[in-house]
Amino acid sequence: MSDQRQRLLDVAQAEGRLTSVVGAVFDRYGAVWAGGAGDAPGLDGQYRIGSITKSVTAVLVMQARDAGLLDLDDPLSAHLGEIGGYGEVTVRDALAHTSGMQSEPRGPWWERTRGSDVAALLAANDGSGRVAGPGEWFHYSNLGYGLLGEVVARRFGGRWRDLAHDRLFRPLGMRTTSYLPRPGAQAGWSVDHFTGIRVHEPLTETGAMAPAGQLWSTLADLVTWGQVLAGVHPQVISAATLGEMGRPVTPTYGLGLMLDVHPGGRLVGHDGSMPGFMASLQVDPDSGIGAVVLTNATTGIVPRALAVSLIEGDPDASDERPAPWRPTIALPTPVLGVPGVWFWGNTAYEMRWHNDGLELRPLALGGTLWERFEIVDGALVGVLGYHRGERLDVVRRPGGSISHLECATFVYTRTPYDPYVEIPGGHPR
């Protein structure tokens, strides 16, 4: 099983072009397996966890409810005053994303810009962005969790970030979970789709929107938080309240928790993403078995699917391991300007520079690897697929721009062929 799980991470890193990916499987007693691929840290390597933060905010809300400080059917205005917009939304609907409020706060993209204070957040969101009536349907709202964070701050009388630390992380011994990254935390990366060149993603302090996605954490601490969601730590939240949070309000969401199933039973937890990071924490509340996945990439995997796969293992896994993905430092001269979308007739392909080779993938077939060319004696030569051994010529104009690509009479152009103009090549495959 350990080899199966490690292979899952190896494949995710190679195919998803991840700088690093780490995962752990746990039960009610602690971690039972952990692994990593790429430039991966250990159990205490810090990543941004994005919207897993929402499950923390939701537990604080439920603690306030259990302490008699609020009711889930209270309107937000009962705790935030006349806020100008969305004051009629109930705490329950905000928790379940059934409030009908817009998904993101007005203004610049909150995940990539320095956050404002609560007064500015309230003033900017006057209710005109509403997409549905209360309870009409599920519409994920980061804005709703920004407002919920302020509700618990006012009910408990402290900053949201301090409440999370004092009421949750410190009592649970989650010493490597923090509001801001600690020294040595993983950098957030985005990878150019065609060239494989990495760039740093912005690192922002999200201000009033922090309760929706600010936190940083580690495999070790998220194992502990997964145990909380499995009912192992009733001193933080009671089994009855956890059960309430895990009951479906909509088919895929409860009160602050995503809901799913796996072959062995049901799952509760949350996914997370922020620029440069993706994460997922999933646990079966009945068995206490769960998994955590963390990566410092903006895209490339479906974190929840990988977490569920780690729980189940991969009984059909072979012993083969893909070559690890390596970031491109710079494009070699022969392929400058080549990566991108090309057409053979009307058929669209992407040409992607990947691990020192040019890969041809038909877009209509979901990007399946079709052919691969590598530089041999200064020329691009096929090493995989129909054109193995053939030379791919990059035909350039006098000024250096690319006219077209040609390989054994197959011609690739930047736009689909004009059906009334004769183009050489075009053999069917």
Image (spheres, rainbow, N blue to C red):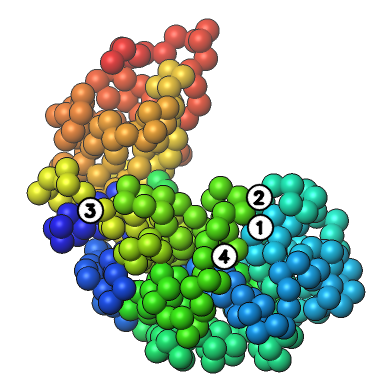
Residue 328 in picture, x, y percent from top left = 31, 57
**If you read the primary sequence from the N terminus, does the residue marked by circle 1 or circle 3 appear first?**
1
Q: Which residue is mark 1?
A: 97
Vertical comparison of 272 with 235: above or below: above
Instruction: Identify residue type, mark 4.
Output: Glu
Marks 1,3: beta carbons within 8 A = no
Q: Is residue 267 left or right of residue 252?
A: left
Dot in front, 4 or 1: 4
Q: Which residue is mark 3?
A: 313
Query: In percent of the image, x 67 and y 78: which residue is there?
Result: 65
Vertical comparison of 173 with 93: above or below: below
Residue 7 position by quadrant: bottom left
Q: Which residue is mark 4?
A: 244
Residue 291 in picture, x, y percent from top left = 33, 64
- Circle 3 packing at 10 Å, graded few (<14), some (14-19), many (20+), is some
Q: CA distance from mark 3 to mark 4?
A: 30 Å
Marks 2,3: beta carbons within 8 A = no
Q: Nearer the viewer, residue 386 or 254?
A: 254
Q: Which residue is mark 2?
A: 138
Query: In percent of the image, x 40 and y 64: which residue is there?
Result: 285
**If you read the primary sequence from the N terminus, does the residue marked by circle 2 or circle 3 appear first?**
2
